[in-house]
Each structure stands twice: as structure tokens, then as C-alpha cells.
Amino acid sequence: MKSVTLKELGLLLDGVIQGDDTLEVNSVATLENAKSGQLSFLANSKYRSQLEATRASAVLLSAKDAQEYQGTALIVKDPYVAFARVAQFLDTTPNAAVGIHPSAQIDLSAHLGEGVSIGANAVIGANVILGENVQVGAGTVIGQDVIIGSNTRLWANVTIYHDVHLGQNCIIHSGAVLGSDGFGYANERGQWVKIPQTGGVRIGDRVEIGASTTVDRGALGHTEIHSGVIIDNQVQVAHNDVIGENTAIAGSTTIAGSVTIGKYCIIGGNCAIAGHLSITDGVHISGSTNIIGNMREPGLYSSATVAMENRVWRKNSVRFRQLDELFLRVKTLEKNLKTPD
């Protein structure tokens, strides 16, 4: 198990040590569950009551919180970001693959960079280019003409169709499918006529895509996910969507085709975004929100109703259908109440 002194962490985080800087920690934990040898953090005031009772060897604290704490602390500007940095430094997650497994099927035309690892039963197609230190997990399939940048990690059973480009330092989790066909059809007298999806997928650097998430290829042109985007599990990104830099999308959200989402947006879980819309930079959308129109101004947007007893919900749903009628009645009453000029 890896361990590090507080002095070393202070240099890493540009922090100030309160107490013994030679003390060593080997992992991170919550205030409530931490044990000796672990580092904890206080980033939310509602957990302040747990601070004095914690058994952590040291705690990441803001300067204000450190004034009220008698134990060993590492004082930093943002304890939560500092926690993330320390967690990365002490991370013990194994590699997706080590070496090249003899059962891997690698096309002779594929180019593998130095340090590439490929797991058991993985398949690498024609003209694939894998950058340095790419990790390909067991059972992963990479189609022809795919390009994957250095230090990108594909976990087990990822499927990447043809003509998909991934940047450097990406993480693609198990079950993700990149480059599957978009949902494009024409209707001829009741019969569906498939429209070939001839575009590709272009993904920037430092993108993380969650388990069982699907990113469809473009119908014409490419589906684009720009650098720094993070996408949770079981998200649907449809054909020709464009997602701007450093946007975050939580689980089970569905994005229909030809949607453009700006930079630095945060989209909560279980949202539904209708097709051919534009969402500007800096939009925050609460979970379970349905978006059916363009969003041209940054800010926080919400829609879904809260849970309530079924009998109350049934009454309110009837009243909701009566809103238009009620609006017209009120408008008529207001008009009749106006004093004549």
C-alpha cells in the first residue's frame, strides 16, 4: 500500500501543515469512517459535527475550519479539490490490461504505440492506431480506422465501431458503445427506410464516458465530444450531437439528435433533451428536467414535479389539464373588471 507524508502532500497541494508534517497517510476516507493512517476532508458544513470525533490521522481543511480544529490538518484553499488530488495520488486501481494477451486478435495493419496493453479476447481491427500506453481491456472490440490517443484507457467489453477518434488521457468504462448507428429512418408508405449513418465520432482529450453509455455516429458529419467532458453511466448521445468543453452529464440522461450543448454546462441525471436544440455555455439543468426549446442564457433550469401521494397527484394531473381553460377564464374576468377609459 502506498503511503505519503503530510509534508509531501503539502508540497503537492500547496497547503500548510497544522501539526506533525512527518505523519504518513495511505488512503482517504470520510470523516465518519476514517481510521488511523487515513486522510479525511471537510468540504460541506453539514458534516462539521463529525470533525472532532473523526479517527483520521489528518484532515484537509480550509483556513477557517482549521482555526476550530485541534488535530493534525493540511490547510488548503479547496478541501474537496484537494481530496480529489490526493485520491488520484494514492489511487490503487489496477490497469485495464497488462502486456498483450496471446488471445487478443490484432489486425496486421494496426499500429500499436510503445507501452500499449491489450487484454484477453480483445479485437483490434484494420488500420487502427493506438497511441503510447493505451490500455485495452479484455473483450473490447475496436473497429477499423479507429484512432486512440496516448494514455487512454478502455475497460473490459467496450465496443468502438469504425471511424471513431479518441484523444489522449480518456477513460471509457465497460459496456460503452461508441459509433453505433444513429436512429435515422425515412418513412415510405408505412415502411421504414434506413438512412446509412456515414459520419463518425470525434472525442477530445481527457474525456470520461461511463458504463453502458452510447454515443451514436453522425448521419452526415461527426458526433463531437470536446475535451474535458465527463459523461456518467447509461447516457444516450445521439447522432450529430456536439458537446462543448468541460461539460458534465449525469446518468440516464437522453440527448436526441443534432443537439449542440455549450461549454461548462452541468446536466443532471434522467434529463431528456429534444432534438435540434442549442444550449448555450454555462447552463445548469436540474435532474429529471425535460428540455424542448433552445436555451440562450446561462443559468439554472428545472422542470419535473416533486413526488407526492398518488391521490394528490391524480387530482393535480386533472387540474393541470384544465390550466388553459382556467387561464382563459381569468383573462376574461380581468378584462371585464377593467374600468372603462
Image (cartoon, helix red, strand yellow):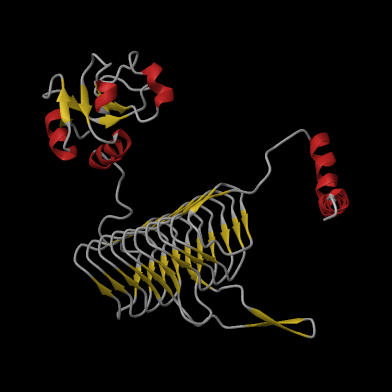
User: What residue is rendered at 13% in x and 20% in y?
Assistant: 20
Residue occupying the far bottom of the picture: 188
Q: Position of residue 6 (x, y in %)?
A: 16, 28
Q: Is residue 44 above or below residue 225?
A: above
Residue occupying the far front of the picture: 341
Which corner quadrant holds the N terminus?
top left
Q: Nearer the viewer, residue 73 or 161?
A: 73
Question: Horizontal placement of 36 versus 178: left or right?
Answer: left
From where the camera sits, is residue 181 visible?
yes
Q: Position of residue 279 (x, y in %)?
A: 51, 63
Count of residue discs:
0
User: What residue is rendered at 26% in x and 41% in y?
Assistant: 85
Q: Nearer the viewer, residue 293 or 39?
A: 293
Q: Is residue 86 above or below residue 323?
A: above
Q: Is residue 129 above or below residue 2?
A: below
Q: Nearer the viewer, residue 179 or 220?
A: 220
Question: Horizontal placement of 242 versus 40: left or right?
Answer: right
From where the camera sits, is residue 118 visible?
no
Q: Position of residue 102 (x, y in %)?
A: 31, 63
Which corner quadrant holds the C terminus?
bottom right
Question: Horizontal placement of 37 versus 162: left or right?
Answer: left
User: What residue is rendered at 25% in x and 68% in y?
Assistant: 131
Q: Position of residue 19 (x, y in %)?
A: 15, 19
Question: Horizontal placement of 59 versus 310: left or right?
Answer: left
